Image (cartoon, grey):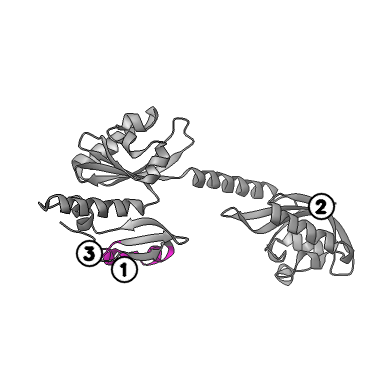
Amino acid sequence: MKTLNSEPLSVTAGEISRNFGHWQDRALEAPVIVTHHGRPRVAVVSAALFFGLTDDGGGGREARERSETGLAALLGAMSEAFVGFDEHLRVTVVNHPFEALAGLGASQLTGLTCADLFPAPCQALIGEQLLRALKAGEVLEFEANASPDGARRCSMRAFPYPGGAALVLLNRSEERSLRRRFEAAEAFRTATSNLHDLGAARLNVRGAFAELDERFAAMTGFKVEELIDYRLTDVVRPAERHALSAQIEAVLRTNEPAVTVATLLVKNGGERSVELSLAPVLEDYAPTGLIAAARAA
């Protein structure tokens, strides 16, 4: 019987990605808790320790209690949904993320089958992967829908588990949604790339140019590299700067896009009236800057 004799180690997701081999070796000595923004997400343990957690080795009730406590600690540190099955593929153990995913408590889930847990279109797929993990000892990774309407798409990993097989699920719905939005944005960028009267720039939270295309720079008569780190308001008529600054602040504060008209100062001393469309750039739901698109008014 192996127990958690060593204190768990803690490492960030970025660090374990860069030095996975090192932390894999450390996991042979003690559990490694992987954190994301300071919160535990995944527990990495050696195979011997993992399987030993459910093997009392003839140690009796006390050993079983230590084993269950250790396993519960590891499952509690996971952000992924976990469900363990017996040899008949009936649920024996779940963690809190799986309870939240299923909308049922552990006592209600215990004894259920794949047919009870997952929608009909993917029951056969998940059941087949669990059987392969159970009978052939394989570790299998795949994607499947976890809700009848297909709105919840999960990446899943099936693997052998003491007494049966287990499944780890990670909800990819938001990631897939973001990917679709990114691809749509890329398509939009491509579609507008031939509109020669439209220029675009990315501003940081100070309203300064972080990057811009040649067309936006050409509207001012400056080169791209000459405008980097200057504020957008620096190349706008002085009388309009306060109003434009307030508009930029409003977009960053409310995360709502806005359209306004501004007069750009051209390098040779001239002026150019443009229509500006401002939209926030969000990361983890917080603004990190904004996009300014300009065209002749």
Residue 218: quadrant of the picture = bottom right
Disc 1 and disc 3 in contact, CB within 8 angstroms: no
Marked residue nearer the N-terminal end (2 or 3) = 3
Inspect this view and state whether residue 221 appears.
no
Marked residue nearer the N-terminal end (1 or 2) = 1
**In the rendered image, which residue does mark 2 sit on?**
260
Inspect this view and state whether residue 282 appears.
yes
**In the rendered image, which residue does mark 1 sit on?**
22
- The circle on residue 5 is 3
* Label 3 packing within 10 angstroms: few (<14), some (14-19), many (20+): few
Q: Residue at x 84, y 57 (%)?
A: 262
Q: Residue at x 29, y 38 (%)?
A: 129
Residue 209: quadrant of the picture = bottom right
Q: Tag 2's secondary structure?
A: strand
Specify whether 287 is left or right of 22. Answer: right
Give the residue type that dot 3 points to.
Asn
Q: Kindly report the distance in space between the C-alpha atoms of the residues bearing marks 1 and 3.
A: 20 Å
Q: Tag 3's secondary structure?
A: loop
Specify whether 67 is left or right of 125. Answer: left
